[in-house]
């Protein structure tokens, strides 16, 4: 939807009477905001769907007690902002943070790849 806003704006604004310009502009602005909101929500869900399994896979390769692994995975919706369980070795905590960072980068790559597949305006189209 966001990609179509610039051509849509040009088309609509040139096709309407001057007295309806304010209404048309408001509708176009609302569409643009909804498109941005949907993009953030959809890409956020995609990021989480890639991050959580990636983190789980990485944590399984670490020598962690199941309770520690579960405590970290229970906070997966916080992405890289989770809190480490209390009382764990600093080296283990660093390994968990590294696993989280790698899972985050994996999710970010998928989001960027999907966004690169979205259609772009034709060259020379108004911004």
Image: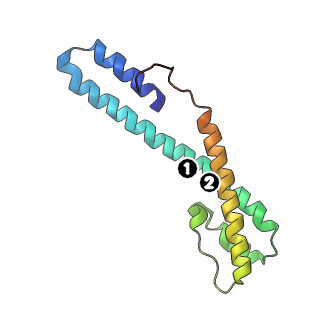
Q: Pointer 2: residues within 10 angstroms few (<14), some, or many (20+)?
A: many
Task: State left or right for residue 122 relative to residue 71.
Answer: left
Residue 32 rendering spot, x and y as whole percentages: 39, 34
Mark 2 highlights which residue? 48
Residue at image coords 44%, 36% = 35
Is there CB contact under 8 Å for labels 1 and 2?
yes
Judge by depth and name the residue closer to the eye, 125 or 16: 125
Q: How is the image coloured?
A: rainbow
Quadrant of the rendered image containing residue 97: bottom right
Residue 64 rendering spot, x and y as whole percentages: 78, 76
Q: Is residue 49 visible?
A: yes
Task: State left or right for residue 116 relative to residue 16.
Answer: right
Mark 1 highlights which residue? 44
The secondary element bearing badge 2 is classed as: helix
In the displayed structure, would residue 62 be above or below residue 120? below
Judge by depth and name the residue closer to the eye, 45 or 18: 18
Q: Pointer 1: residues within 10 angstroms few (<14), some, or many (20+)?
A: some
Residue 106 rendering spot, x and y as whole percentages: 69, 52
Quadrant showing the C terminus:
top left
């Amino acid at each position: 939807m966001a990609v179509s806003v610039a051509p849509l704006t040009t088309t609509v604004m040139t096709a309407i009477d001057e007295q309806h310009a304010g209404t048309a502009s408001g509708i176009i602005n609302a569409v643009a905001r909804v498109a941005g909101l949907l993009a953030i929500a959809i890409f956020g869900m995609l990021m989480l769907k890639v991050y959580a399994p990636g983190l789980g896979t990485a944590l399984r390769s670490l020598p962690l007690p199941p309770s520690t692994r579960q405590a970290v995975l229970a906070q997966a919706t916080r992405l890289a902002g989770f809190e480490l369980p209390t009382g764990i070795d600093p080296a283990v905590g660093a390994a968990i943070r590294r696993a989280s960072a790698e899972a985050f980068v994996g999710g970010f790559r998928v989001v960027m790849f999907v966004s690169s597949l979205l259609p772009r305006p034709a060259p020379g189209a108004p911004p």
